[in-house]
Image (cartoon, rainbow, N blue to C red):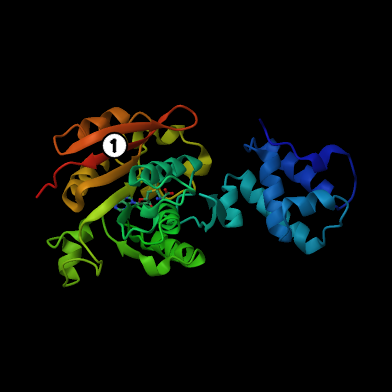
Amino acid sequence: MPHQSPITGHQSPGNDIRTALRDGIAQLEREHTPSAPLAAELLLMHTLGRDRAWLYAHPEQELGAEARGRYFSLIAQRASGVPTQYLTGHQEFWGLDFEVTPDVLIPRPETEHVIEVALERLGVPAGAGAPRRNAALRIADVGTGAGCIAVALAHELPGARVAATDISAAALEVARRNAARHIVSARIDFIKCNLLDAFFPQSPLASAQGKPAPNHPSLSFDLIASNPPYIGREEAAMLPREVRDHEPEAALFAGETGTDIYAPLIAQAAMLLKPGGILVLELGYNSAGHVSGLLGAAEWSDVTITNDLAGIARVASALLKVRVP
Ligand SMILES: C[S@@+](CC[C@H](N)C(=O)[O-])C[C@H]1O[C@@H](n2cnc3c(N)ncnc32)[C@H](O)[C@@H]1O
């Protein structure tokens, strides 16, 4: 159901909160901005440093000239296609507040299924006090972006140590700040590399650094999770402008059809997971068949596809039977 702002229900002239919201919504709707009332509310909350309850309670509060200027500048940017989250600098994921900048993909609610599947596979259902919750698990998050998967898992699993990789140094800086924000920095290693290359002694990065691998307690993992780029270049023209023109290219595209990352990532996981280790991958639209095919190889068992709330195949997970040498 479209979000409707109860504050703007009455007409009022002037320079108060109700008028600012009404005018902001109208400006966004003229540019066909999706969820215009919600965006206008979030931008006004951000401008004033107030929550929604405060806005509702003070519809007649006057807006100063300076606040009004900042608010309508944000409205103009949103109307031109900049995502609200890049304007406010925030996105919630797994109940945690994450900093987001244009250097990182905005974490999506669908990616929470990656966390759900990972916790279920580990025998640690969300919210339950299972003993394995405190186990000394070794986890990798490949393509960490804002760090949402790494931080959410570290937060849920207090005994876990996480290696979070990304090819983008700028993204890793944001992820580091998010780990600090949620007080899990001491248990996450942030590593700039292609996929999991840094964990292979022969990798150019590892040799260039003169060391076989980052100083991680082990080279083998209990769980490897990833939300890799999975959009095809051939689909770029169909993306909303918010995504195509504002989110980082490296976070979106994986070759012409969007499936380029899965094969090398699955091959590396087969070499780096412990026997019985868990692989959890977010799926792009229409990539379930491709990924199930790759996981059909002899070394994988218990391959499962999990749908998201819209009924779309969203997560592939599997167990490694025997570690590939
Ligand atoms: C779809 S985004 C996911 C970000 C975050 N994990 C999330 O779920 O919101 C993919 C991330 O993978 C990174 N990436 C792309 N290609 C990569 C590669 N070959 N190796 C490591 N990271 C890569 C991008 O920079 C981006 O941060």
165 left or right of 156 in image: left
Q: How many marks?
A: 1
304 left or right of 200 in image: right
Q: Quadrant of the N terminus?
A: top right
In the picture as drawn, the residue positioned furthest to the left comes out as 325
Pointer 1: what residue? 259
Is residue 118 or residue 168 the one in the foreground? 118
What residue is drawn where x is 50% and y is 63%? 182
**The quarter of the displayed image where residue 50 is located:** bottom right
Question: In the picture shown, does residue 179 fall above or below 268?
Answer: below
Secondary structure beneath label 1: loop
78 left or right of 213 in image: right
Question: In the picture shown, does residue 97 fall above or below 300?
Answer: below
Amino acid at pointer 1: Thr
Residue 219 is situated, as x and y percent measured from the top left of the image, at 20, 60
34 left or right of 323 in image: right
What residue is drawn where x is 71% and y is 61%? 49
Residue 69 is situated, as x and y percent measured from the top left of the image, at 74, 58
Q: Is residue 59 visible?
A: yes
Q: Is residue 144 visible?
A: no
Question: In the picture shown, does residue 255 fall above or below 75?
Answer: above
Residue 191 is situated, as x and y percent measured from the top left of the image, at 31, 63
**The quarter of the displayed image where residue 64 is located:** bottom right
Is residue 293 or residue 123 the one in the foreground? 123
Residue 40 is situated, as x and y percent measured from the top left of the image, at 70, 46
